[in-house]
Image (spheres, rainbow, N blue to C red):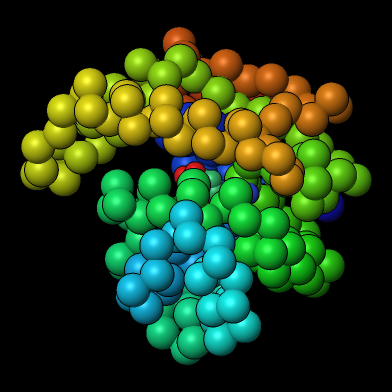
Amino acid sequence: MKIAIDGPAGAGKSTVAKAIAAKLHMNYLDTGAMYRATAYAMIEEGIEPADAAKVVPALSKLDMAICYENGLQKVLVNGVDVTPYIRTSRISKGASDIAVIPEVRLKLVDIQREVANQYDIVMDGRDIGTYVLPDADKKYFITASAHERARRRCEEIRQSGQEADIDVIEREIVARDKTDSNREFAPLKQAEDAILVDTTDMDKERVIDWIIGDITGVES
Ligand code: DC
């Protein structure tokens, strides 16, 4: 069983995908974390993620592995767990920039398909239903208005004790949507056979219950 969950930044895909995987006893792969880890590794090497001429040759030295600890996904780059360092706004932008480069995508998609060959999987990203797993059993495209996505992100940041400016966050989200949707190779796009779930006025429990009901055919 393969389930593809795509959608724009901050729509709550990973929360929903993680919950579905746990309820249905499937593995979960957050593909965004892989683009983030790649951007992080390049920045650590002094390479700008948008600089394809430098990123492409450096890719051969980058060994990426995915592992799970207590059900949580970790991304290892050259044996080092980079998961704690990849959730900053610098890395969000870097991931979106580096994801434009086809060689980066091909390398990461190979790993994603390898994981999907081994396990029943819920995979979230931008191009899972359209490119990575076009034969997925179920596909969902989860979205929400840019303002609502920024509001949720802002709340998360504030809850962690930091300050957040909703206008700045909304601008970053809109910029990322633009880069992710307009790139030439495997852009952010709803697959023709994906179900659109607009969560602007839905809380995450409702979204999770609705999708589980759709997959299992059992309403909760
Ligand atoms: O889901 P996320 O915000 O962690 O993803 C970070 C960036 O990675 C996103 O802006 C675009 C890129 N990405 C991608 O191009 N394709 C994917 N399947 C997942 C993420």
The x and y percentages for residue 41 are 42, 73
Residue 45 placement: quadrant: bottom left
Horizontal placement of 1 versus 140: left or right? right
Q: Is residue 93 left or right of residue 19?
A: left
Residue 93, percent from left and from top: 39, 47
The residue at the point 63 percent across, 20 percent down is 197
The residue at 47%/55% (across/down) is 50
- Using the image as rendered, state which of residue 200 and residue 178 is in the foreground: 178
Relative to residue 142, is residue 25 depicted above or below? below
| Whether residue 83 is visible | no
Q: Quadrant of the C terminus?
A: top right
Can see residue 41?
yes
Q: Residue furthest front?
A: 53
Residue at the far top in the pictured view: 201
Asked whether 6 or 199 is in front, the reply is 6
Depth check: give the residue in front, 124 or 90.
90
* Number of numbered labels in the structure image: 0
Where residue 3 sits in the image (x, y, percent)? 75, 45
Horizontal side, residue 114 vs residue 60: left or right: right
Query: Which x, y percent locates residue 52?
Result: 55, 61
The residue that appears at 66% across and 51% down in the rendered structure is 123
Q: Is residue 123 above or below residue 138?
A: below
Residue 119 or 111: which is nearer the viewer? 111
Say which residue appears at 62% left-offset and 32% top-offset: 182
Left or right: 197, with 179 as reference point: right
